[in-house]
Image (spheres, rainbow, N blue to C red):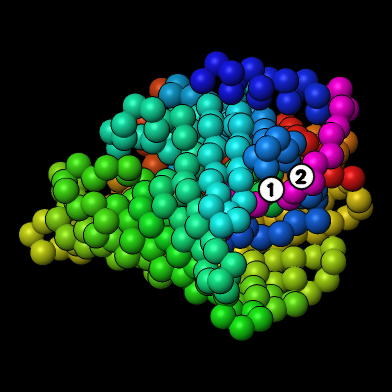
Amino acid sequence: MFKGAALASLFFMATHFGWTQDGPGQQPPANNQQTSPPSATIFSTTAVRWDNIDFSALFDGYYSFNNNHPDSNLNGLYNFNDRTDRVDLNLLRLTLNRDPDPIGFHVDIGFGRAMQIMHTPVPDPAGFRFLEQAYVSVKPRSWKGLEIDLGDFATSAGAEVIETKDNWNYSRSLLFALATPYYHFGLRASMPIGGSFNAGVQVIDGWNTIVDQHGNNMRTVGLTSAVTRKKFTWNNNYYVGPQWTAATRGNRNLYDTTLLLTPADRFSAYVNFDYGQQHALLNSLNRWYGVAVAAHFQATKRIAFSPRAEYYNDPSGFTTGTRQQLHEVTLTGEYKMLDGLLGRLEYRRDDSNVPYFDRGAAYGVSKSQSTVTVGLIAFFPIKH
């Protein structure tokens, strides 16, 4: 643990003072089933390699201001960068990766607010609270592209991912925070079919759990697909399986789809839709659904802008604790200071149709909140 933290600290010093090192292999995305929307401001990284094992690291810190000044010092409906009116660490991570040839592995060791939220409140085994992902991969050449992973891996659902640098905006969308899981434990397989289609299946424990506390291990199924063309990519994900809590008994269903449009080198956009439902006690049914639209404008080599707008409906209050309809608008500006060092300035406004947000010491009295966030993202190594 302490060695991982020391290596991560060294990486930040190296990127801060402009040191770089090239390596022979490109780091894979955190999510093998579905990649996040590609951005011209996301610079290709290649890990330091030792004995066919790639090492890379990431630092992500921020300062947030909330006009409601809640006494809790938390931005309502946020996750990961939810602490406000203070400087905080979102994620400090060290990655070890070996591409499957035919056997490989991937491990992400992390610290910070993102890791705390990922593993709360599910009582995962203590050591897993520092793991974002940890899985073994098998991909023999004779399998014609079929890859099988076993372990703890990021979900395939959603247009955004856990790593801030691989998203267009600094804060995560309402859909990421409320509608979809973060990770799964189990088995997944994916295989290319033809030149533009990829299909996958997952057999997992459920949502955000290493060991299901109710004995429903390996009883959730996920189906994934991706159509990739020159000007667009269309991803679809469906999860179904038992998700039991004190208030729910029965299956949880989630359908997630993202259409990514890439019509020009300097412009991209996506539309993300989610619909979920959870069977509850007394034969009731909880539902939640929403849509997010975002765009990315690469103004210059160093400067980019990314607006995002969302609508989210929680008619039974299952995901937010309150029956409400939400709207969210975000504008993010990004500046590349140097290779491996990104700065982001973001304004975001959240609105509800009922009083929900804290204002000072008053709990749930405001229908809106406005926040401003300054984020600093550093990663190594860098490929020139």
Q: Position of residue 222 (x, y in %)?
A: 37, 65
Q: Which residue is mark 1?
A: 27
Q: Position of residue 90 (x, y in %)?
A: 58, 31
The amino acid sitting under disc 1 is Gln
Quarter of the figure with residue 280? bottom left
Residue 132 in view (yes/no): yes
The amino acid sitting under disc 2 is Thr
* Residue range of the region highlighted in magenta in the rendering: 16-33
- Residue 29 sits inside the magenta stretch: yes
Image position of 60 with respect to 273: above or below = above
Q: Which residue is mark 2?
A: 46
**Disc 2 element:** strand
Query: Are the two marked residues, 1 and 2, in contact with CB atoms closer than 8 angstroms?
Result: yes
Q: Position of residue 162 (x, y in %)?
A: 55, 45
Image position of 71 with respect to 364: above or below = above
The reply, left or right, for residue 302 in relation to residue 318 is right
Quarter of the figure with residue 85? top right
Q: Main secondary structure of the magenta part?
A: loop
Q: Nearer the viewer, residue 234 or 356?
A: 234
Q: Which mark is residue 109?
A: none
Circle 1 Cα neighbour tier, 10 Å, few/some/many (<14 / 14–19 / ≥20): many
- Residue 281 sits inside the magenta stretch: no
**Disc 1 element:** loop
Quarter occupied by the C terminus: top right
Q: Nearer the viewer, residue 178 or 6?
A: 6
Q: Residue at x 86, y 32 (%)?
A: 20
Q: Residue at x 73, y 50 (%)?
A: 26
Q: Nearer the viewer, residue 155 or 45?
A: 45
Return the disc, 1 or 2, that comes first in the chain's sequence: 1
Q: Position of residue 357 (x, y in %)?
A: 43, 38
